[in-house]
Amino acid sequence: MDEIRKLERKSRIRNTLWKTVIFALLIAWAIIVLFPFYWMLLTSVKSYSSYNAEYIPKFFTLSPTIANYIQAFTAVPLAKYFANTLIFTLITTGLMLIIIVLSAFAFSRLEFKGKNLVFTLFLSLMMIPNELVIITNFVTITNAGLRNSFLGLILPSITSIFYIYLLKENFEQIPDELYKAAKVDGTSDFKYLWKVMIPICKPTIITVVILKVIECWNSYVWPRLITDDENYFLVSNGIQTIRESGFGRENIPAMMAAVVVISVPLILLFLFFHKKIMEGVSRGGTKG
Protein backbone atom coordinates (compact mmCIF):
# COMPACT_ATOMS: atom_id res chain seq x y z
CA MET A 1 0.00 0.00 0.00
CA ASP A 2 2.87 2.38 0.83
CA GLU A 3 4.38 1.80 -2.60
CA ILE A 4 1.06 2.55 -4.27
CA ARG A 5 0.68 5.77 -2.28
CA LYS A 6 4.22 6.81 -3.22
CA LEU A 7 3.52 6.17 -6.89
CA GLU A 8 0.27 8.14 -6.70
CA ARG A 9 2.05 11.02 -4.93
CA LYS A 10 4.79 11.06 -7.58
CA SER A 11 2.17 11.00 -10.31
CA ARG A 12 0.32 13.96 -8.76
CA ILE A 13 3.56 15.92 -8.37
CA ARG A 14 4.53 15.14 -11.97
CA ASN A 15 1.12 16.23 -13.25
CA THR A 16 1.25 19.41 -11.16
CA LEU A 17 4.71 20.28 -12.46
CA TRP A 18 3.66 19.57 -16.03
CA LYS A 19 0.57 21.77 -15.73
CA THR A 20 2.67 24.52 -14.12
CA VAL A 21 5.11 24.43 -17.06
CA ILE A 22 2.25 24.49 -19.57
CA PHE A 23 0.55 27.44 -17.87
CA ALA A 24 3.85 29.31 -17.64
CA LEU A 25 4.48 28.82 -21.36
CA LEU A 26 0.92 29.90 -22.19
CA ILE A 27 1.25 33.02 -20.06
CA ALA A 28 4.58 33.86 -21.69
CA TRP A 29 3.08 33.34 -25.15
CA ALA A 30 0.05 35.47 -24.27
CA ILE A 31 2.33 38.30 -23.15
CA ILE A 32 4.31 38.10 -26.39
CA VAL A 33 1.13 38.13 -28.50
CA LEU A 34 -0.70 40.83 -26.54
CA PHE A 35 2.22 43.19 -25.97
CA PRO A 36 1.95 44.89 -29.42
CA PHE A 37 -1.72 45.65 -28.69
CA TYR A 38 -0.81 47.03 -25.27
CA TRP A 39 1.93 49.17 -26.80
CA MET A 40 -0.46 50.44 -29.46
CA LEU A 41 -3.08 51.37 -26.85
CA LEU A 42 -0.45 52.94 -24.57
CA THR A 43 0.98 55.06 -27.38
CA SER A 44 -2.49 56.22 -28.39
CA VAL A 45 -3.10 57.81 -24.98
CA LYS A 46 0.27 59.58 -24.75
CA SER A 47 0.43 63.23 -25.70
CA TYR A 48 2.45 64.22 -28.74
CA SER A 49 4.99 66.13 -26.65
CA SER A 50 5.47 63.41 -24.04
CA TYR A 51 5.90 60.76 -26.72
CA ASN A 52 8.59 62.78 -28.52
CA ALA A 53 10.32 63.56 -25.21
CA GLU A 54 10.87 59.86 -24.44
CA TYR A 55 14.44 58.94 -25.32
CA ILE A 56 13.86 55.61 -23.60
CA PRO A 57 10.33 54.25 -24.20
CA LYS A 58 8.19 54.03 -21.08
CA PHE A 59 5.83 51.13 -20.48
CA PHE A 60 3.20 53.28 -18.74
CA THR A 61 1.95 56.85 -18.63
CA LEU A 62 0.71 58.91 -15.68
CA SER A 63 -1.13 61.45 -17.84
CA PRO A 64 -3.28 59.66 -20.45
CA THR A 65 -5.17 61.79 -22.95
CA ILE A 66 -7.94 61.28 -25.53
CA ALA A 67 -6.74 64.21 -27.65
CA ASN A 68 -5.17 61.80 -30.14
CA TYR A 69 -8.54 60.12 -30.77
CA ILE A 70 -10.19 63.48 -31.39
CA GLN A 71 -7.40 64.45 -33.77
CA ALA A 72 -7.64 61.12 -35.61
CA PHE A 73 -11.26 61.89 -36.50
CA THR A 74 -10.73 65.57 -37.30
CA ALA A 75 -7.45 65.51 -39.22
CA VAL A 76 -8.62 62.82 -41.67
CA PRO A 77 -12.11 61.63 -42.75
CA LEU A 78 -11.91 58.54 -40.52
CA ALA A 79 -15.68 58.52 -39.92
CA LYS A 80 -16.25 58.37 -43.70
CA TYR A 81 -13.85 55.44 -43.99
CA PHE A 82 -15.85 53.71 -41.27
CA ALA A 83 -19.14 54.34 -43.07
CA ASN A 84 -17.73 53.05 -46.37
CA THR A 85 -16.39 49.93 -44.69
CA LEU A 86 -19.69 49.30 -42.94
CA ILE A 87 -21.65 49.60 -46.22
CA PHE A 88 -19.16 47.35 -48.03
CA THR A 89 -19.16 44.75 -45.22
CA LEU A 90 -22.94 44.52 -44.74
CA ILE A 91 -23.85 44.34 -48.43
CA THR A 92 -21.04 41.94 -49.33
CA THR A 93 -21.76 39.61 -46.41
CA GLY A 94 -25.52 39.62 -47.06
CA LEU A 95 -25.18 38.82 -50.77
CA MET A 96 -22.52 36.19 -50.13
CA LEU A 97 -24.70 34.49 -47.50
CA ILE A 98 -27.60 34.16 -49.96
CA ILE A 99 -25.34 32.75 -52.68
CA ILE A 100 -23.46 30.22 -50.57
CA VAL A 101 -26.56 28.95 -48.71
CA LEU A 102 -28.42 28.29 -51.97
CA SER A 103 -25.31 26.78 -53.60
CA ALA A 104 -24.56 24.53 -50.63
CA PHE A 105 -28.18 23.36 -50.55
CA ALA A 106 -28.12 22.56 -54.28
CA PHE A 107 -24.90 20.55 -53.99
CA SER A 108 -25.94 18.71 -50.83
CA ARG A 109 -29.62 17.89 -51.49
CA LEU A 110 -30.66 18.42 -55.10
CA GLU A 111 -29.93 15.93 -57.85
CA PHE A 112 -28.99 17.27 -61.27
CA LYS A 113 -26.83 16.12 -64.13
CA GLY A 114 -23.13 16.85 -63.71
CA LYS A 115 -23.42 17.88 -60.06
CA ASN A 116 -20.24 16.11 -58.94
CA LEU A 117 -18.30 17.40 -61.94
CA VAL A 118 -19.41 20.98 -61.34
CA PHE A 119 -18.54 20.77 -57.64
CA THR A 120 -15.12 19.29 -58.47
CA LEU A 121 -14.48 22.16 -60.89
CA PHE A 122 -15.52 24.60 -58.16
CA LEU A 123 -13.04 23.05 -55.73
CA SER A 124 -10.30 23.18 -58.36
CA LEU A 125 -10.73 26.97 -58.48
CA MET A 126 -9.35 27.07 -54.95
CA MET A 127 -6.01 25.96 -56.40
CA ILE A 128 -5.68 29.15 -58.48
CA PRO A 129 -3.45 31.76 -56.78
CA ASN A 130 -5.31 34.81 -55.52
CA GLU A 131 -2.96 37.07 -57.46
CA LEU A 132 -4.24 35.69 -60.76
CA VAL A 133 -7.86 36.10 -59.69
CA ILE A 134 -7.22 39.71 -58.62
CA ILE A 135 -5.68 40.52 -62.01
CA THR A 136 -8.66 39.01 -63.84
CA ASN A 137 -11.15 40.81 -61.60
CA PHE A 138 -9.30 44.09 -62.03
CA VAL A 139 -9.42 43.88 -65.82
CA THR A 140 -13.10 42.87 -65.78
CA ILE A 141 -14.20 45.60 -63.37
CA THR A 142 -12.13 48.24 -65.18
CA ASN A 143 -13.56 47.29 -68.59
CA ALA A 144 -17.06 47.44 -67.11
CA GLY A 145 -16.42 50.99 -65.92
CA LEU A 146 -16.99 50.10 -62.27
CA ARG A 147 -13.80 51.50 -60.77
CA ASN A 148 -14.30 53.90 -57.86
CA SER A 149 -17.74 52.52 -57.05
CA PHE A 150 -19.24 50.34 -54.33
CA LEU A 151 -20.42 47.92 -57.00
CA GLY A 152 -16.84 47.43 -58.18
CA LEU A 153 -15.73 46.86 -54.60
CA ILE A 154 -18.50 44.40 -53.78
CA LEU A 155 -18.99 42.19 -56.86
CA PRO A 156 -15.72 40.16 -56.71
CA SER A 157 -16.28 39.39 -53.01
CA ILE A 158 -19.85 38.06 -52.95
CA THR A 159 -18.99 34.38 -53.19
CA SER A 160 -16.50 31.93 -51.74
CA ILE A 161 -15.81 28.35 -52.79
CA PHE A 162 -14.45 27.53 -49.35
CA TYR A 163 -17.60 28.71 -47.56
CA ILE A 164 -19.79 26.79 -50.03
CA TYR A 165 -17.75 23.67 -49.32
CA LEU A 166 -17.89 24.22 -45.54
CA LEU A 167 -21.66 24.72 -45.56
CA LYS A 168 -22.25 21.83 -47.96
CA GLU A 169 -20.40 19.45 -45.63
CA ASN A 170 -22.51 20.74 -42.76
CA PHE A 171 -25.79 20.32 -44.67
CA GLU A 172 -24.86 16.74 -45.59
CA GLN A 173 -24.71 15.82 -41.89
CA ILE A 174 -28.49 16.30 -41.70
CA PRO A 175 -30.15 12.88 -42.27
CA ASP A 176 -31.71 12.36 -45.70
CA GLU A 177 -34.79 10.94 -43.98
CA LEU A 178 -35.76 14.45 -42.84
CA TYR A 179 -35.66 15.71 -46.42
CA LYS A 180 -37.64 12.75 -47.75
CA ALA A 181 -40.25 13.10 -45.00
CA ALA A 182 -40.57 16.81 -45.74
CA LYS A 183 -41.08 16.10 -49.45
CA VAL A 184 -43.76 13.51 -48.62
CA ASP A 185 -45.56 16.21 -46.60
CA GLY A 186 -45.45 18.49 -49.62
CA THR A 187 -42.81 20.86 -48.25
CA SER A 188 -41.00 22.86 -50.91
CA ASP A 189 -37.22 22.84 -51.13
CA PHE A 190 -36.98 26.49 -50.11
CA LYS A 191 -39.24 25.97 -47.09
CA TYR A 192 -37.25 22.90 -46.03
CA LEU A 193 -34.03 24.91 -46.33
CA TRP A 194 -35.46 27.82 -44.33
CA LYS A 195 -37.29 25.84 -41.64
CA VAL A 196 -35.00 22.83 -41.16
CA MET A 197 -31.50 23.12 -42.58
CA ILE A 198 -30.67 26.71 -41.69
CA PRO A 199 -31.76 26.39 -38.00
CA ILE A 200 -29.82 23.12 -37.60
CA CYS A 201 -26.68 24.56 -39.20
CA LYS A 202 -26.95 27.94 -37.49
CA PRO A 203 -23.52 27.71 -35.73
CA THR A 204 -21.74 27.19 -39.04
CA ILE A 205 -23.68 29.98 -40.74
CA ILE A 206 -22.85 32.36 -37.88
CA THR A 207 -19.21 31.34 -38.20
CA VAL A 208 -19.22 32.06 -41.94
CA VAL A 209 -20.82 35.46 -41.35
CA ILE A 210 -18.26 36.42 -38.70
CA LEU A 211 -15.31 35.28 -40.81
CA LYS A 212 -16.66 37.18 -43.82
CA VAL A 213 -17.15 40.33 -41.76
CA ILE A 214 -13.53 40.09 -40.57
CA GLU A 215 -12.38 39.45 -44.13
CA CYS A 216 -14.26 42.48 -45.46
CA TRP A 217 -13.10 44.72 -42.63
CA ASN A 218 -9.46 43.77 -43.22
CA SER A 219 -9.72 43.88 -47.02
CA TYR A 220 -6.80 45.86 -48.38
CA VAL A 221 -5.37 44.72 -51.73
CA TRP A 222 -8.57 44.76 -53.79
CA PRO A 223 -9.91 48.12 -52.49
CA ARG A 224 -6.42 49.57 -52.96
CA LEU A 225 -6.38 48.47 -56.61
CA ILE A 226 -9.92 49.37 -57.62
CA THR A 227 -10.30 52.74 -55.88
CA ASP A 228 -8.19 55.87 -56.01
CA ASP A 229 -11.04 58.16 -54.99
CA GLU A 230 -10.95 58.94 -51.27
CA ASN A 231 -14.77 58.91 -51.19
CA TYR A 232 -14.65 55.10 -51.56
CA PHE A 233 -11.71 54.33 -49.28
CA LEU A 234 -12.16 51.65 -46.63
CA VAL A 235 -10.56 51.79 -43.19
CA SER A 236 -7.59 49.69 -44.29
CA ASN A 237 -6.82 52.05 -47.17
CA GLY A 238 -7.58 55.03 -44.96
CA ILE A 239 -4.95 53.90 -42.45
CA GLN A 240 -2.43 53.54 -45.26
CA THR A 241 -3.31 57.04 -46.46
CA ILE A 242 -2.86 58.39 -42.93
CA ARG A 243 0.51 56.65 -42.64
CA GLU A 244 1.73 58.04 -45.95
CA SER A 245 0.60 61.57 -45.16
CA GLY A 246 2.58 64.00 -43.04
CA PHE A 247 -0.01 63.62 -40.26
CA GLY A 248 0.64 59.91 -39.81
CA ARG A 249 4.41 60.15 -40.06
CA GLU A 250 4.78 63.01 -37.61
CA ASN A 251 2.06 62.32 -35.04
CA ILE A 252 2.58 58.68 -34.12
CA PRO A 253 0.22 58.76 -31.06
CA ALA A 254 -2.66 60.02 -33.23
CA MET A 255 -1.82 57.36 -35.82
CA MET A 256 -1.99 54.69 -33.10
CA ALA A 257 -5.32 56.12 -31.93
CA ALA A 258 -6.75 55.67 -35.43
CA VAL A 259 -5.47 52.07 -35.51
CA VAL A 260 -7.05 51.35 -32.10
CA VAL A 261 -10.41 52.72 -33.23
CA ILE A 262 -10.33 50.55 -36.35
CA SER A 263 -9.17 47.41 -34.50
CA VAL A 264 -11.61 47.51 -31.57
CA PRO A 265 -14.74 46.38 -33.52
CA LEU A 266 -13.03 43.22 -34.77
CA ILE A 267 -11.50 42.45 -31.38
CA LEU A 268 -14.90 42.76 -29.69
CA LEU A 269 -16.54 40.69 -32.44
CA PHE A 270 -14.06 37.87 -31.96
CA LEU A 271 -14.26 37.99 -28.15
CA PHE A 272 -18.06 37.75 -28.22
CA PHE A 273 -18.32 35.04 -30.87
CA HIS A 274 -15.08 33.01 -30.65
CA LYS A 275 -16.97 30.01 -29.24
CA LYS A 276 -19.41 30.13 -32.18
CA ILE A 277 -16.47 30.24 -34.59
CA MET A 278 -14.85 27.18 -33.06
CA GLU A 279 -18.16 25.32 -32.90
CA GLY A 280 -19.05 26.11 -36.50
CA VAL A 281 -15.65 25.10 -37.89
CA SER A 282 -15.65 21.83 -35.93
CA ARG A 283 -19.20 21.00 -37.09
CA GLY A 284 -18.28 21.73 -40.69
CA GLY A 285 -15.35 19.33 -40.57
CA THR A 286 -17.16 16.42 -38.84
CA LYS A 287 -18.96 13.70 -40.72
CA GLY A 288 -21.62 11.38 -39.35
Image (spheres, rainbow, N blue to C red):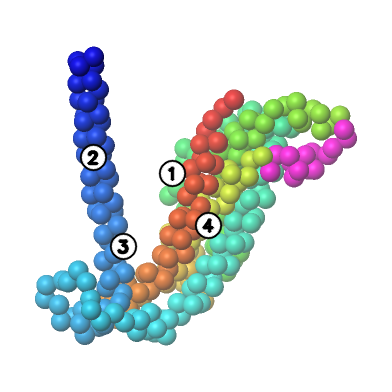
Q: Which span of residues is magenta-colored?
A: 185-199
Nearer the observer, 130 or 179: 179
Residue at 20% x, 16% y: name it: 2
Q: CA distance from mark 2 to mark 4?
A: 38 Å
Local crowd at mark 2 within 10 Å, few (<14), some, or many (≥20)? few
Residue 217 x, y percent position in the rendering: 48, 61
| Residue 80 is covered by the magenta coloring | no
Residue at 84% x, 37% y: name it: 187
Q: Amino acid at mark 1?
A: Pro
Q: Which residue is mark 3?
A: 37
| Residue 194 is covered by the magenta coloring | yes
Label 3 or label 1, whichever comes before in sequence order? 3
Residue at 45% x, 55% y: name it: 271
Where residue 54 sits, quadrant-wise, is: bottom left
Q: CA distance from mark 3 to mark 4?
A: 21 Å
The label number, if any, that marks residue 213 in the structure image: 4
The label number, if any, that marks residue 20 in the structure image: 2
